[in-house]
Amino acid sequence: MLNLPNSITISRIILVIVYTIALAWDGSVSPHINEVTGHWFQPISTTACIALWAFVVAAITDFFDGYLARKYNLVTNFGKLIDPLADKILVSAAFIYLTAAGICPFWAAILIIFREFLVTGLRQLAVAQGVVIAADKLGKWKTAAQLAYCIACMTQLAYGGNLMEPLRSLSIGETGMWFREITLWLSIILTLWSGANYCYHSRHLLHG
């Protein structure tokens, strides 16, 4: 049954399509990441701005679908499977693009995407044995850190140095860069930790 939480989850996948089309429409945004033009909230790339807000809305839906499912007792096996899958599609799409744009280190993107494939494989193995593995709290924190990093990078792509102008007057113009570095390393740490945690607690599945 396609209830409200599951519908919100599917909308997140649709927003990934919007995100991808927007960035594919103009692949030349990355060279302008440090450009400053006009008003401080003026986008330097319309397509990157569309992609950014599609990504932000998609990230927000990640909170609401789980919240509504738990609050109104609408948790389903379909939701347990599609919710983490939608997260993986969203995060993978962002990291692939950010790597191609030369913003995210390629090894970090490979590590993060590898973990997502690994956990997806474990879930498929569990389903074959009649078990559903839902996302745990550690995995949710991992996703939150990844989304924060991707949003910070996409904000730079959409608005360049414009958003940093008010901060430069306070002598903290590098805040955006520091935030990106912190969330990237936090994402990597939580990716390794949560991946190892899933493997440990799913080890019995390998024995059938």
Image (cartoon, rainbow, N blue to C red):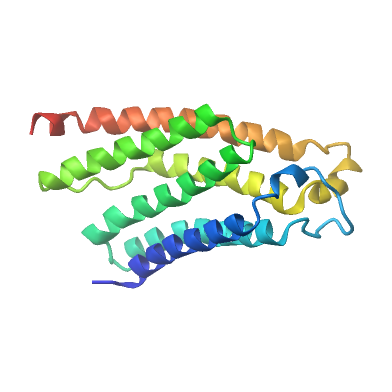
Q: Position of residue 69 (x, y in %)?
A: 33, 63
Residue at 50% across, 34% down: 109
Which residue is situated farthest in the left direction here? 208
Work out which quarter of the rendered image holds the C terminus and state it: top left
Q: Relative to 113, does residue 39 appear above or below in the rendering? A: below
Q: Quadrant of residue 114?
A: top left
Q: Position of residue 187 (x, y in %)?
A: 51, 34
Q: Quadrant of residue 47?
A: bottom right
Q: Position of residue 20 (x, y in %)?
A: 53, 56
Which residue is situated farthest in the right direction here? 169
Q: Position of residue 151 (x, y in %)?
A: 61, 49
Total numbered labels placed on residues in the image = 0
Q: Relative to 87, does residue 70 appear above or below in the rendering? A: below
Residue at 35% across, 72% down: 4
Q: Nearer the viewer, residue 22 or 74?
A: 22
Residue at 42% across, 37% down: 113
Q: Relative to 140, does residue 202 appear above or below in the rendering? A: above
Q: Nearer the viewer, residue 11 or 104?
A: 104
Work out which quarter of the rendered image holds the N terminus and state it: bottom left
